[in-house]
Amino acid sequence: MTPDPAAFRTSQPLAWTYHRGTEGRLFTTPEAISPPPQPGREDPTARWVPLPPGVRVDAPLAELIRDRVSCRAFRDRPISLAELATLLRAGYGTVGVTDDGPLYMVDRAVPSAGGLYPLELSLVVRSVDGLPAGVYHYVPLADGLEQVREHPVPAPLVSYLFMDQPWAAEAAVVLVLSAVCGRSMVKYGDRGYRYLLLEAGHVAQNLVLAATGLDLGTVNLGGFFDDELSGLLGLDIESEIVLYGTAVGHPSSGNRTARRALGRLQDS
């Protein structure tokens, strides 16, 4: 059977419009702009939590890639603050400085179009030793957390926000990636939206591989109610958009099939 070349365009018109509208075409690329780095979303009045030294992950990369598996069944057991610090640094932390004459860059753990690093990392914390439950924002350059909401988020609300996925509420913490669109799109125009999505994927993969090295379970969450989740995290939805989530906790089993809990996926 010959594939219908128009199937994508006709069956998913919004996705098609997005794809075509962000294509790079000869003679239509906007003039390159090199904007100065913009500060992150920090609140100097928020309660500050410095991060402790992390936990060293010694497993070879090939082993981490092989062992990674989505986990939808978590134990009711906290992770340590040191483990959380390891994940945050692996996902979007700073790893060094490039200082070469006029070029000065703070290097991160992932590639970013134009070195603009438009993403922000928020945390919905349920069970982390040494960290009260609530909502936090990671500040990479200062290597710490600022508290956004000091009270625990009710489990039914967390599950609802992630479209009734119960494992989101059962994980020790849900890490949420958002993007301050202007940081990237001021240089790349509409195509910069693609770069936001690519960068979120880089960060999420670092997170899940680091978690695998810590014997933690993870499941990535692409389904959520955007505006409601943004409200919980304290985001300005006119300029910052939620892209991706990763639930992290201790897996209920060492068995790959049991971790996947595919029966729960069918029931949800």
Image: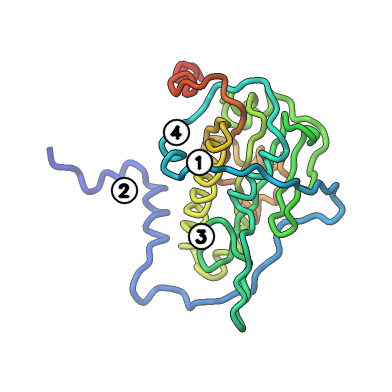
Of mark 3 and mark 4, the one earlier in the sequence is 4
Which residue type does callout 1 highlight?
A: Ala
- Residue highlighted by disc 4: 67
Which residue type does callout 4 highlight?
A: Asp
Instruction: Please tell me the numbered disc located at residue 59.
Output: 1
Number of the front mark, 4 or 2:
4
Which residue type does callout 2 highlight?
A: Arg
Q: Residue at x 56, y 76 (%)?
A: 34
Instruction: Please tell me the numbered disc located at residue 232.
Output: none
Of mark 1 and mark 3, the one earlier in the sequence is 1
Quadrant for the N terminus in the image: top left
Residue 34 vertical position relative to residue 235 in the rendered view, above or below: below
- Residue highlighted by disc 2: 9
Number of the front mark, 3 or 4:
4
Residue 104 placement: quadrant: bottom right
Direction from residue 207 to residue 141 in the image, left or right: right
Report x, y in % for residue 85. Answer: 68, 44
Q: Please tell me whether mark 4 sits on a helix, a strand or a loop.
A: helix
Of mark 3 and mark 2, the one earlier in the sequence is 2
Report x, y in % for residue 188. Answer: 50, 68
Q: Residue at x 54, y 65 (%)?
A: 185
Direction from residue 208 to residue 236 in the image, left or right: right
- Residue highlighted by disc 3: 111
Residues at circles 1 and 4 in contact by the CB criterion of under 8 Å:
yes
